[in-house]
Image (cartoon, rainbow, N blue to C red):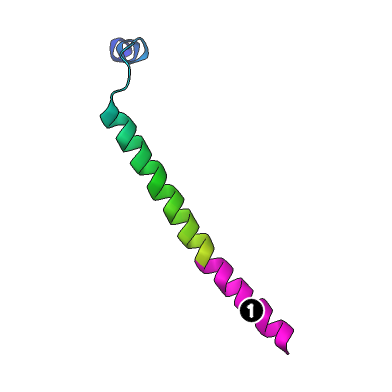
Amino acid sequence: MSDFIRRIWSDDEGQDIAEYAVMLAVILVLVVGTIRLIGSNSNTVFSSVASAVAQ
């Protein structure tokens, strides 16, 4: 097990384009998901505030 960890730690190969593409895809999914979640929650909050102000 320690040999495996040592090989991974000392691996000096650079990342290729496929790994960057996977990282970018994961980041985009997280950002889009967060924006959609915040967007739907903020719409509810703004609607509640607007109805409270209108009264």
Q: Position of residue 42 (x, y in %)?
A: 58, 67
Q: Is residue 15 above or below residue 46?
A: above
Q: Is residue 33 left or right of residue 55?
A: left
The residue at which mark 1 appears reads as 48
Quadrant location of residue 52?
bottom right
Quadrant for the C terminus in the image: bottom right
On the image, the x and y values in percent for residue 10 come to 35, 9
Q: Is residue 50 above or below residue 16?
A: below
Q: Residue at x 52, y 64 (%)?
A: 39
Counting from the top left corner in percent of width and height, residue 3 is at 29, 10
Which residue is depicted at the point 28% across and 23% down? 16
Label 1 secondary element: helix
Question: Is residue 46 one of those drawn in magenta?
Answer: yes
Q: Main secondary structure of the magenta part?
A: helix
State the image quarter where residue 23 is shown.
Answer: top left
Q: Which residues are magenta?
A: 40-55
- Across and down, in percent, residue 38 comes to 53, 61
